[in-house]
Amino acid sequence: MRGEIWTQPKVFAIVLICILNFLMLWEDKENLKLPQSWKINKLLWEIFLGIGLIATLTSPFPWRSLFGQEQMGDGLLYWLLIAIFTLSNSLLLRLHPELARSQLQGLVIGGVILAISIFPQTINWRIDYTTTSGQLMQSNILASTIFQNQQPIGLYSHRGHASFVLAAVAIMTLVGWQWQWINTRLAATAGIIIIPALLLTQTRAGLLALLVATIYLLGRKHYKLLVPATLVCLLIIGIATSTRQMNNLPLIKQITSNRVDLWQMANYRITLRPLLGWGMDGFGTAYSHVRPGIKITKVIRLGDFSFDYQDENGQIKTAQLPTTKAHNLILDTSLSVGLLGLASYLALLGWCLWQVIKSPYRGIEAVFIAYLVFTFTWFECAQFTHLAWWSLSICGMSRVPKIAP
């Protein structure tokens, strides 16, 4: 259900954007030249997707690998779409660099709308902006399957997802202001709306991502402003950590919201299929096949939140998946496409980051830096991953002079 409400519409929007990109490129095909850097980018995508295809074909559940888990949505087809989106947008911005400013401004406007949607949910957690808004499945669960402690979600399926988008848009606003693509009044207005909404999501990873990316952007030039801002941000993160009691867990598990156990599960299962992994979106596939203390003869069905398996006595049993992700970019990628896929993915990231950093548009890569910080304890998801890759598609403008305000 969550995928139909919050994931699929966003993926459909990316499909429409790709179609529009192709139409605009086709109209101007006479002037279209493929630079060497774009060809290298394309080759790196082909290597990553090729490994992903092999991982899908060898996966115990190839359909899960192809389409991804219902809410996450980041199967092989999604990554193919992201490759098309990134490569086509890169070419389009090379031909029409003036579109970059409009794209950035549009994303900031979308972020402001998301931020505004957060505030009513902090007052009434039953608001989820769906057709069943206000209806309950249980006393703490909405009809849309949103739990009370997952609010405020804004226009996403979890407050964590919303927090990254708000952090990313805050960075885009700062970059747009630095480039004079957004005037001071509008940038301040956007910030005044976005930052409180981000705080209301109570997601430490989103705050930390914003903090690290801001320090990267402003650096020594504004250290007098950054020092108190950093202290305040760390104080908020500390308060959020200390007030989140989790059954008297050890400190490290308290700090990571018990992600350490997930990381240990993932690390062990990576060693079982190290080269090509378990298939895209592979945590559920890997977890269902290996359960310490329980001999699983065969996994019969892998659902979005549970799986059916046959034990050594031939009995069919059902077990719950603890989560859908390992909550770490490196571990989740290794689970999905193995160490070969991880190496190709990191090479792709490194190349795209380098292309942006050495271009006149240096600074926008801070959005992806925020993404890397966020996914250290979270994960990639079809609801928001495209925002990070949009920032890297700016590398298509690496030879285009900075657009004047």
Image (spheres, rainbow, N blue to C red):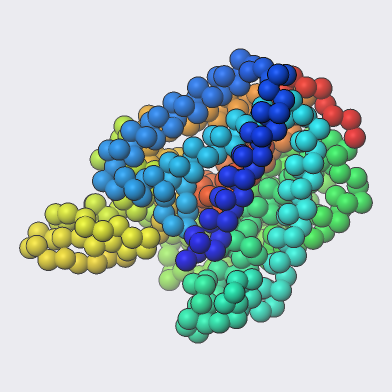
Give me the residue at 9% from left, 62% from top: 314
Residue 255: where, in percent of width, then height?
A: 51, 58
Between 321 and 70, the one lying in front of the other is 70
Q: How many labels does the image show?
A: 0
Asked if residue 195 is positioned above or below residue 361 in the image, the reply reads below
Above or below, 326 relative to 337:
below
From this viewpoint, which residue is outermost toward the top?
Answer: 36
Residue 356 location (% of width, % of height): 68, 27
- Seen from this angle, which residue lies furthest bottom? 139
The residue at 55%/19% (across/down) is 40
**With 386 as the anchor, is 30 left or right in this view?**
right
Q: Where is residue 273 in the image (x, y as percent from the top left)?
A: 27, 38
**In the rendered image, the vertical position of residue 179 relative to residue 284, given as above or below:** above
Q: Residue at x 30, y 57 (%)?
A: 302
| Visible residue check, residue 13 | yes
Indicate the quadrant containing the C terminus: top left, top right, bottom left or bottom right: top right
Q: Is residue 20 left or right of residue 320?
A: right
Residue most extreme to the left: 313
Give the residue displayed 70% in from the left and 19% down from the top: 30
Residue 67 in the image: x percent, y percent?
41, 48
Quadrant in the picture for residue 332: top left
- Inspect this view and state whether residue 260 appears: no
